[in-house]
Image (spheres, rainbow, N blue to C red):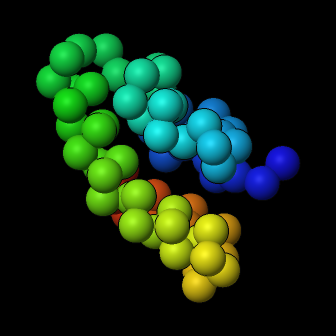
Amino acid sequence: MSGIICPNCKASLALDRIGVHFQKFCSAIKTEVSRELSVKKFNRLYPYMQSQARGEITLEELQAEADKIFR
Ligand SMILES: [Zn+2]
């Protein structure tokens, strides 16, 4: 499967499930505040997902950005 590991809950996420995971389903999201924070972080990750889709960065680099943003 092509995807990344969620830095919060360590679930493996298919690329097309990353957005919905960070907006809704991540088990690290327990409050409205943490949901909003997670959405903000996802918005920062999104351009990197687009770069990865265009082949400009590797999946490993996308994972590294996710780790940095969600740390
Ligand atoms: Zn998660």
> How many discs appear?
0
The residue shown at (51%, 63%) is 49
Residue 30 vs 15, above or below: the answer is above
Task: Tell me: 55 left or right of 8.
Answer: right
The extreme bottom residue here reads 56
Q: Is residue 68 something that shows in the picture?
A: yes
x, y percentage for residue 43?
31, 52
x, y percentage for residue 30?
31, 15
Location of residue 68 (image quadrant) = bottom left
Residue 12 vs 44, above or below: the answer is above
Foreground pick, 53 / 4: 53
The residue shown at (49%, 46%) is 7
Task: Tell me: 18 left or right of 58.
Answer: left
The residue shown at (78%, 54%) is 2
The extreme right residue here reads 1
The residue shown at (59%, 71%) is 52
x, y percentage for residue 48?
46, 69
Residue 6 vs 62, above or below: the answer is above
Residue 14 vs 45, above or below: the answer is above
Q: Is residue 64 something that shows in the picture?
A: no
x, y percentage for residue 3?
70, 52
Task: Tell me: 11 left or right of 24.
Answer: right
Task: Tell me: 51 left or right of 47.
Answer: right
